[in-house]
Image (spheres, rainbow, N blue to C red):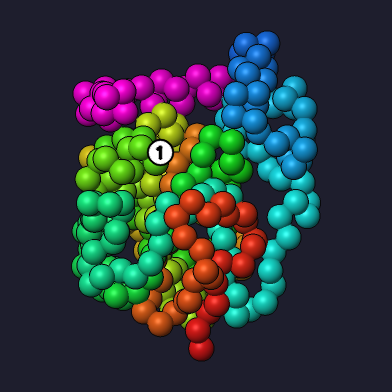
Amino acid sequence: MLDTLKVKLQYVLPKHALSRLVGKLAAARLGVVTQAFIRLFIKQYQVDMSEAKHESPTAYATFNEFFTRELKAGARPLCDDPQKLIYPVDGTISQLGKIEADTIFQAKGHDYSLTTLLGGNSEHAAPFQNGKFSTIYLSPKDYHRIHMPIDGTLTHMTYVPGELFSVNPLTTANVPGLFARNERVVCLFDTPKGKLAMVLVGATIVASIETIWAGTVTPPAGKKVQTWTYPATGLNAVHLKKGEEMGLFKLGSTIVACFEPDMVEFADVGPGEVTRLGNVFGQLKD
């Protein structure tokens, strides 16, 4: 009964207004108030600060600085085998598997459209039909910077307006088409093995989604789908190596990665598997 109430409340809460308010508070320099909240958050979610570049809560002037904290050098060793796919984030696998034509599995009883997820562009979606996908949830305690699972050259970035439902396991299991409903940023890459889509999904109280090439993409939130195209060469080209940072969330969320058919073979993992940036996620096919 309580779980049902939690889900139903999300349909009526002013999620965008609440998220933007939290975003302003998270960016505010509130001195001892900020420090107290960071300490409380660390205790509540059992955040491992020994991995952080700056271990002391007093090193962070805002909650956002703490939440998007960098890791110590060497904290996440990267598998440098060019034939291996690596996890792009710390988190937990929600689902992974085959994209059935244009359909991605969300949870028992719920699927959603690949084309809708990628912003409604059928040309962008076509290469991924019958390919593979992985959905990884980032909990509040996790490291919230997103890295490349393979070398890639950015071709397009699309901002897709939408809802801001929570993306925790409870909501994922109960809100139809969740990841294709929430606000998101879709990043498309050409890689040596095929095309890659990295979808950064927003959620309740996610104050900001950023990429390293564009900075803050949202907010401000728009009401229309917007797409930017990037060149393959020249000064404006964006080339990222496996393991390089590509973006971040200010407060937790989810990523959905999509791969072309016959591009990857995932390791023997499934829902509930804890992921660590840089560890082997699978094999890249020839």
Residue 147 screen position, x and y as percent: 57, 57
Q: Magenta part of the protein: which range? A: 1-29
Quarter of the image for residue 190 reads: bottom left
Looking at the rendered structure, the kind of residue marked 1 is: Asn
Residue at 50% over, 19% down? 25
Whether residue 116 appears in this view of the structure is yes
145 or 286: nearer the eye? 286
Residue 99 screen position, x and y as percent: 30, 69
Tell me how many marks there are. Answer: 1
Position of residue 260 relative to residue 46, above or below, is: below
Residue at 53% over, 35% down? 140
Badge 1: how crowded within 10 Å, few (<14), some, or many (20+)?
Answer: some
Residue 8 screen position, x and y as percent: 23, 27
Q: Residue furthest bottom?
A: 286
Position of residue 72 relative to residue 48, above or below, is: below
Q: Is residue 1 left or right of residue 203?
A: left
Q: Secondary structure at mark 1?
A: loop
93 or 218: nearer the eye? 93
Quarter of the image for residue 80 reads: bottom right
From the image, give the main secondary structure of the stretch colored magenta. helix
Residue at 65% over, 33% down? 47
Residue 189 screen position, x and y as percent: 44, 68
Position of residue 69 relative to residue 191, above or below, is: above
Quarter of the image for residue 208 reads: top left
Q: Is residue 183 magenta?
A: no
Q: Is residue 27 magenta?
A: yes
Q: Residue furthest front?
A: 1
Residue at 54% over, 25% down? 27
Which residue is denoted by mark 1 in the rendering?
168
